[in-house]
Image (spheres, grey):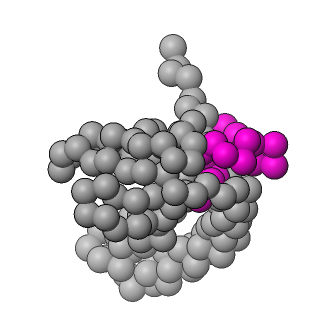
Amino acid sequence: MAEAEKQTILTPEGLRKLEEELEHLKTVKRKEIAERIKASKEFGDISENAEYEDAKNDQAFIEGRILQLDQMLRNAKVIDNQHAPADTITVGATVRLKDMGSGEEISYTIVGSPEADPDQDKISNESPVGRALLGRRNGDTVDVQVPAGKMKFRVLKISH
């Protein structure tokens, strides 16, 4: 019995990016890999051909990623914040927080896990901080258990 496929929560921007990546892999990368495989076969015996092995490994990776993206897009739920309460943190919201321990102010955008990119201050709704922030309002204080210990934040501003 197949396990139920997990719903993929995406912002409209995240959906667009995944669709673009899938299209690029199917139209550009597949052709590039096929050309590399064809060219590497011309080097002779493929049983000892490192170039051929490398190209085949890349092909397997690309095909795996295509399958993964197909599944995520098939199960995509796009979050539209047009009707979200302006004073409540939801997926797609950008939140300004004050770290009560350090006094530092930080901003995060809450996104679905495929879009998470901490370097861009995009955190997953499934992460400890993301999960703790969902449903909170301006002025709320939030305690979050993270691997490094307990953190405390105050919600300063929510924007959609």
Determine whether, in the image, residue 65 is placed left or right of residue 50.
right
Of all residues, the one furthest to the front in this rendering is 139
Q: Is residue 56 left or right of residue 83?
A: left
Nearest the viewer among 75 and 155 is 155
Q: In this view, does 58 lie above or below 139?
A: below
Q: Position of residue 44 (x, y in %)?
A: 37, 81
Q: Residue drawn at (43%, 81%), measured in percent from left and top?
A: 40
Give the residue at the far top of this rendering. Answer: 1
Q: How many marks overall? A: 0
State left or right for residue 9 relative to residue 118: right
Q: Which residue lies furthest to the left in this view?
A: 148
The region drawn magenta spans: 71-94
Of residues 144 and 63, the one nearer the viewer is: 144
Question: In which image quadrant can residue 136 be found?
Answer: top right
In the image as oriented, which residue stretches furthest toward the right?
82
- Judge by depth and name the residue closer to the eye, 101 or 33: 101
Residue 7 appears in the rendering: yes
Location of residue 144 in the rendering, given as x and y in whole percent from the top left corner: 32, 41
